[in-house]
Image: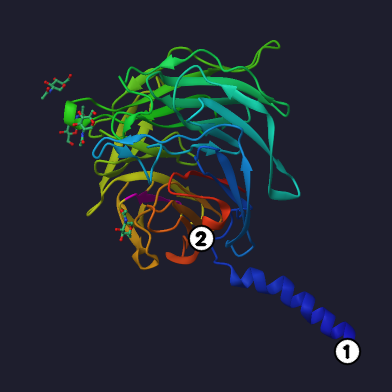
Amino acid sequence: MRAETLASVVLAALVLPVSALPQTTRSSSGKAIYIITNDAKNAVVAVRIGRDGQLSRGTTTETGGAGGSGVDSATNQTAAPDSLFSQSSLTNIFAVNPGSNTVSMLSIDPRDPTKLSLVGTPATLPGEFPVTVAASVKNRLVCVGMTGAKAGVSCASFSANGLGAMDGLRTFDLGQTTPPAGPLNTVSQVLFSSDESVLFATVKGDPTVNNTGFLAAFPINKACSGKGASLAQQGTKSSPNGTAVLFGSSIIPGSSNLFVTDASFGGAVLAIDGQDVASTVGKGVIDGQGATCWATVSPATNTAFVSDVAVNRLVQMSLTDATPLGQIDLSSNGDPGLIDLRAAGNFVYALSPGNGTTSPAVTVVDAIGARQVQHFQLQGLGVSKSAMGMAVLV
Ligand SMILES: *[C@@H]1O[C@H](CO)[C@@H](O)[C@H](O)[C@H]1NC(C)=O
Ligand SMILES: *[C@@H]1O[C@H](CO)[C@@H](O)[C@H](O)[C@H]1NC(C)=O
Ligand SMILES: *[C@@H]1O[C@H](CO)[C@@H](O)[C@H](O)[C@H]1NC(C)=O
Ligand SMILES: *[C@@H]1O[C@H](CO)[C@@H](O)[C@H](O)[C@H]1NC(C)=O
């Protein structure tokens, strides 16, 4: 009898989770999400993801640098939410310090993904107001995008011991100030291509002054004879037809195409040719949008999810041609809108830093069921409306 009970318990444990999961599940679920507070004493907030995809418990670890916020050019006020006008202000696990022009490296305890430690000291950048960071494990290279009075891209090697020295700035002539006035005319994001052979940077134009945004692409010089990989000094710039305010991007898995948002209309799929020049494959205009700025690709649905700082919903779009496929209305949770987001497993994690009246929270959405499953409050972790970024450990 005892053995029988035990056997049925074991059987239930084996059978239940499998049958409870949607058929399409193949991708692994996340272990933790990470956000920067971007406050004067900048810190990374880590929150655990449970087996059910939901968030619980969190930690706050200082980066050793200072946060900083841009100025909203429409109001002349400190920008928030969307304090940095960027996507990817941290990536596993490097974090920008916009107020002290440095980038920090943190390590994750293998037994506890919310236990972080600062590795070495933050590396000093050759430009001003860093807002986005990308890391290539294959090339042991971390690259940072800056958008202040000295704007551009700089990279450094990294190892388990920390960051090397940042190399010379590849400049973008934006005529910006420090802190920058935005969101128009600022660097949006840096990210590596799926084979990690090219670094892309999206830069927003300003249609009001006939300033066209662009995608910059810098090839990687591979590591050879004891010399580490580096980023080429010269890149190419292209302005894909019909785009103006390129913002958050995501690599489309299994392809060399990019999914990008454009804050002026919605989203687009870009093809990248052998010379790293981008062209528009498809454009999706989102009805009723305020500013569509952040994008992630869900492995569960093989679609993009995009967010809007001014409209509290997620819009799902095609990875083939950016056609809008549907929307998940989240307005009943009271947030003003959403910024950085990341997909992992069957879920999408989207940050709403709040606006000072509403409190900061992460909305967890079931990508397949297209519905909110959790609205996780962050104010207990020292997060305020300046928070940015979303990284996920899978
Ligand atoms: C913002 O400040 C600048 C310089 O101080 C000024 O020229 C501009 O008119 C201000 N704009 C608004 C919307 O207040
Ligand atoms: C905008 O810039 C383009 C290309 O530089 C130029 O051909 C066009 O005349 C400009 N338009 C205005 C209104 O200044
Ligand atoms: C750009 O797009 C417009 C319509 O959206 C089209 O008429 C034009 O031919 C395109 N230009 C190029 C160079 O593809
Ligand atoms: C913050 O967002 C809430 C919900 O959209 C809105 O009711 C409130 O007016 C906003 N407050 C500010 C200061 O913008």
Q: For numbered disc 1, what is the local secondary structure?
A: loop
Q: Position of residue 43 (x, y in %)?
A: 58, 41
Quote the CA–CA distance across marks 1 and 2.
46 Å
Q: Name the one closer to the observer, 286 or 124.
A: 124
Q: Position of residue 26 (x, y in %)?
A: 59, 56
Toward which corner of the image does residue 209 lie, by quadrant? Answer: top left
Magenta-drawn stretch contains 306: yes
Residue 64 appears in view: yes
Q: Position of residue 389 (x, y in %)?
A: 48, 43
Mark 1 lies on residue:
1
Quadrant of the displayed image that contains ligand 4: bottom left
Which residue is depicted at the point 23% across and 38% down?
74
Amino acid residing under circle 1: Met
Toward which corner of the image does residue 72 lie, by quadrant? Answer: top left
Earlier sequence position, callout 1 versus callout 2: 1
Above/below status of 97 relative to 350: above
Task: State the residue lying farthest toward the right.
Answer: 2
Q: In the figure, is residue 122 to the left or right of 185?
A: right
Amino acid residing under circle 2: Gln
Q: Name the one closer to the observer, 54 or 358.
A: 358
Which residue is depicted at the point 34% across and 49% down?
309
Q: Name the one closer to the observer, 157 or 320.
A: 157
Q: Which residues are magenta?
A: 302-309
Mark 2 lies on residue:
377
